[in-house]
Image (spheres, rainbow, N blue to C red):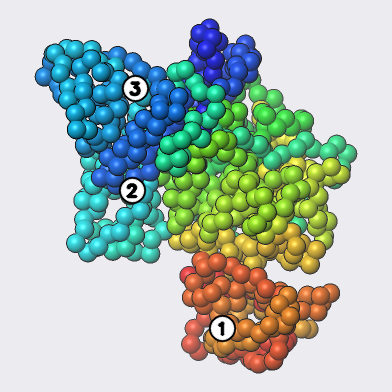
């Protein structure tokens, strides 16, 4: 994507100062504002392209020469089409080759220099370089000055997949990708964090797919003068669109509270989501252990009196003393309080009425961002690096909360934020807000809200619901949650009470408030079993939700139910006229169903594939959730509306163990069945 700038030197310098101030704040890990005069100058700058941010997509360092070759082929095409890369002069030191000089200056990276780089630089220096037969021929004196492209190149660490065979060593795989300076204890910890949910120990005997730190390169390419259009749309530039980083526009999904309306107090929210506050069936908060949660948001008051175990990633102080008394009410301001409000819903102390605080054992690591600066592609790229650094420490997250949307701008296709998320498919669950625009989010629709529309087994998209016993997607009279098949589950999101800056509490509404409730429950699932994979947690939260016919056209599941999600050791079976039973499935017969939406078309699945089967008396048929494999909880969760063409008995035991009494459950007697979690 292209960075707005101006030919006016004074304005350019002022913008540079503003951006430097933002980076200074960012380096301290805090969200902050730049000087207002600088911000105003930045807004006044005409929007013309001035830079391209390019990042290699190499899986190994051996792939770098081909990527730099493509980059310089495209830059040559840019020059032919009327664009021009800015240049600078360098000295080729005595005893250095052209290749040495260009590598030192950061014109390219990797082990070897592609000929396309040499040809491009040769064309900038016709007095001392000719190209007979296509190969540059340099005639320069020691300490000569030459012209090179103004490219600011830096190495970055990315995460890539490697297949380890029995003959491969961990040292060899890491060395070939140059993701660690040396293979030491810190590098081994990094490797284990990136693969910590593998079923086997990560050691020399491991065989299979590994996520490995890998050296890549990022280049900021200055255009001078800037072209009038996005240079990626010029002839010959299509070859690097996949490597060019776009800027983002970002929106947080909160609105001000509705004065005088019913508030989402701790008691009200916990009741609606079935939170086992007194130690419900199958769950009691353990006396030890933590789960790691990362919140990507704006500023968070980590010193809030109601927050514990909250720290700022790469952080410094945010708010000054003295502070007002703990728990005072105030009007929440989204720009200032959004992040603190979100964190409180996950991990506020549970002995107050300030908000849900679902998991007091959550260690919350806040990745503070200035969302306004994400319109600059260089700043957006830095967020990718920060996510990567989370996994080089013991704070590698089990769950990440993202209560915002972003949209990419321009022809660049290298969405680094999504790339960072995608690389953690086996490690981390990303809980994302659906948005408050009342918009349909489904495959085939204009589903461009990211990351909510990114279909992946480790991304769960959360809609916001009203307080009604039969909830709707409305957030007051003027706003409605986004909905559709890309939305997986819902949670209360109207007038929710939580922590805000400076020891106070206040209310905000939106899917930004619904998402952290799901994050809190997900973190409790990890607290109960730290080996669960993200897709297992995602599916469990969806199929254990409270189901309402009014929501079936709005989302895949229903309203979050914490107790049912956490009671995963045994199946929950509700038969007609009987109390809920907690049983253990003993057989796995083939069950025929008729699909109501496909003119009663018949299909059959094993009973062990069923994750939820609930009879809907108003609809006079069942809703069925299942996966394609009886032994794979992490497979894609499917939903169908069905009838039972026949009846049969399903054998359960009353408790684990071979000597337990058996129970024969007639399929037609089941009102609601929730499977135990398949490990």
For the point 78% across and 83% down, the residue is 577
Residue 378, given in percent of the width and then of the height, sits at 47, 29
Reading the image, the residue beneath label 1 is 606
For the point 68% across and 83% down, the residue is 601
SS class of the residue under badge 2? loop
Q: Residues within 10 Å of mark 3 (few under 14, many from 20)?
A: many
Badge 3 or badge 1: first in the primary sequence: 3
Eye-nearest disc, 3 or 1: 3
Residue 548, given in percent of the width and then of the height, sits at 77, 65
Q: Residues within 10 Å of mark 2 (few under 14, many from 20)?
A: some
Badge 2 or badge 1: first in the primary sequence: 2
Left or right position of 348 against 213? right
Kindly indicate whether the residue at mark 3 contacts the one at mark 2 (C-beta within 8 angstroms).
no
Quadrant of res 351? top right
Reading the image, the residue beneath label 2 is 59
Residue 578, given in percent of the width and then of the height, sits at 75, 82
Reading the image, the residue beneath label 3 is 149
Residues at marks 2 and 1, CA–CA distance in whole angstroms: 40 Å
Residue 673, given in percent of the width and then of the height, sits at 67, 77
Q: How many marks?
A: 3
User: Between 77 and 27, which is closer to the camera in this rendering?
Assistant: 77
User: Eyeballing the image, is 653 above or below 182?
Assistant: below
Kindly indicate whether the residue at mark 1 contacts the one at mark 2 (C-beta within 8 angstroms).
no
User: Between 311 and 91, which is closer to the camera in this rendering?
Assistant: 91
Quadrant of res 614? bottom right
SS class of the residue under badge 1? strand
Q: Residues within 10 Å of mark 1 (few under 14, many from 20)?
A: some
Left or right position of 295 against 474? left
User: Between 102 and 202, which is closer to the camera in this rendering?
Assistant: 102
The answer to whether residue 316 is seen in the rendering is no
For the point 59% across and 22% down, the residue is 47
């Amino acid at each position: 994507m292209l960075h707005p700038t101006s030919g006016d030197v004074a304005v350019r310098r002022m913008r540079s100062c503003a951006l430097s101030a933002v980076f200074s704040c960012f380096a301290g890990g805090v969200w902050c504002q730049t000087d207002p005069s600088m911000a105003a100058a930045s807004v006044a700058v005409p929007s013309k392209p001035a830079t391209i941010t390019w990042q290699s997509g190499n899986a190994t360092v051996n792939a770098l020469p081909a990527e730099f070759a493509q980059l310089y082929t495209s830059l040559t095409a840019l020059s032919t089409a009327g664009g021009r890369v800015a240049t600078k002069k360098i000295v080729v030191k005595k005893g250095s080759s052209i290749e040495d000089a260009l590598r030192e200056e950061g014109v390219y990276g990797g082990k070897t220099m592609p000929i396309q780089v040499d040809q491009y630089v040769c064309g900038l220096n016709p007095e001392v370089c000719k190209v007979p037969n296509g190969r540059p021929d340099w005639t320069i004196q020691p300490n000569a000055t030459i012209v090179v492209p103004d490219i600011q190149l830096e190495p970055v660490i990315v995460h890539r997949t490697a297949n380890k065979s029995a003959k491969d060593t961990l040292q060899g795989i890491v060395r070939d990708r140059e993701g660690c300076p040396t293979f030491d204890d810190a590098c081994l910890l990094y490797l284990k964090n990136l693969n910590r949910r593998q079923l086997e120990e990560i050691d020399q005997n491991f065989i299979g797919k590994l996520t490995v730190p890998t050296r890549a390169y990022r280049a900021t390419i200055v255009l001078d003068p800037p072209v009038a259009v996005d240079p990626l749309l010029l002839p010959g530039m299509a070859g690097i669109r996949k490597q060019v980083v776009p800027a983002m526009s970002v929106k947080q999904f909160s609105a001000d509270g509705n004065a005088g309306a019913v508030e989402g107090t701790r008691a009200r929210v916990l009741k609606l989501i079935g939170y086992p506050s007194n130690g419900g069936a199958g769950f009691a908060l353990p006396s030890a252990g933590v789960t790691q949660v990362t919140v990507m948001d704006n500023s968070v008051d980590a010193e809030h009196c109601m927050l514990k175990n909250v720290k700022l990633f790469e952080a410094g102080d945010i708010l000054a003393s003295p502070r007002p008394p703990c728990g005072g009410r105030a009007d929440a301001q989204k720009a200032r309080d959004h992040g603190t409000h979100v964190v409180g819903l996950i991990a506020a102390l549970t002995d107050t009425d300030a908000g849900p605080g679902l998991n007091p054992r959550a260690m919350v690591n806040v990745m503070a961002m200035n969302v306004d600066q994400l319109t600059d592609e260089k700043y957006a790229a830095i967020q990718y690096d920060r996510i990567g650094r989370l996994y080089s420490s013991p704070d590698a997250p089990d769950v990440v909360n993202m209560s915002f949307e972003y949209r990419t701008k321009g022809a660049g296709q290298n969405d680094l934020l999504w790339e960072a998320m995608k690389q953690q498919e086996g490690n981390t669950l990303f809980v994302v807000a659906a948005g408050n625009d009342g918009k349909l989010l489904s495959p085939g629709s204009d589903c461009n809200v990211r990351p909510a529309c990114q279909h992946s087994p480790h991304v769960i998209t959360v809609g916001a619901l009203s307080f009604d016993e039969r909830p709707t997607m409305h957030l007051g009279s003027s706003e409605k949650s986004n909905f559709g098949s890309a939305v997986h589950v819902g949670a209360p999101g109207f007038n929710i009470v939580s922590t805000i800056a400076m020891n106070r509490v206040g209310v905000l509404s939106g899917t930004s408030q619904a998402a952290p409730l799901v994050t809190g429950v997900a973190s409790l699932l990890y607290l109960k079993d730290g080996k669960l994979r993200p897709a297992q947690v995602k599916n469990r939260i969806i199929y254990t939700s409270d189901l309402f016919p009014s929501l079936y056209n709005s989302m895949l599941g229903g309203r979050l139910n914490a107790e049912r999600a956490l009671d995963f050791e045994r199946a929950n079976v509700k038969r007609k006229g009987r109390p809920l039973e907690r049983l253990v499935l003993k057989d796995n017969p083939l069950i025929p169903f008729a699909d109501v939406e496909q003119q009663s078309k018949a299909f059959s699945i094993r009973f062990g594939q069923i994750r939820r089967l609930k009879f809907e008396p108003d609809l006079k048929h069942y809703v069925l959730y299942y996966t394609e494999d009886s032994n794979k909880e992490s497979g894609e969760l499917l939903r169908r509306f069905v009838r039972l063409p026949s009846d049969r008995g399903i054998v359960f035991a009353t408790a684990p163990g071979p000597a337990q009494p058996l129970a024969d459950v007639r399929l037609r007697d089941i009102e609601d069945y929730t499977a135990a979690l398949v490990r």
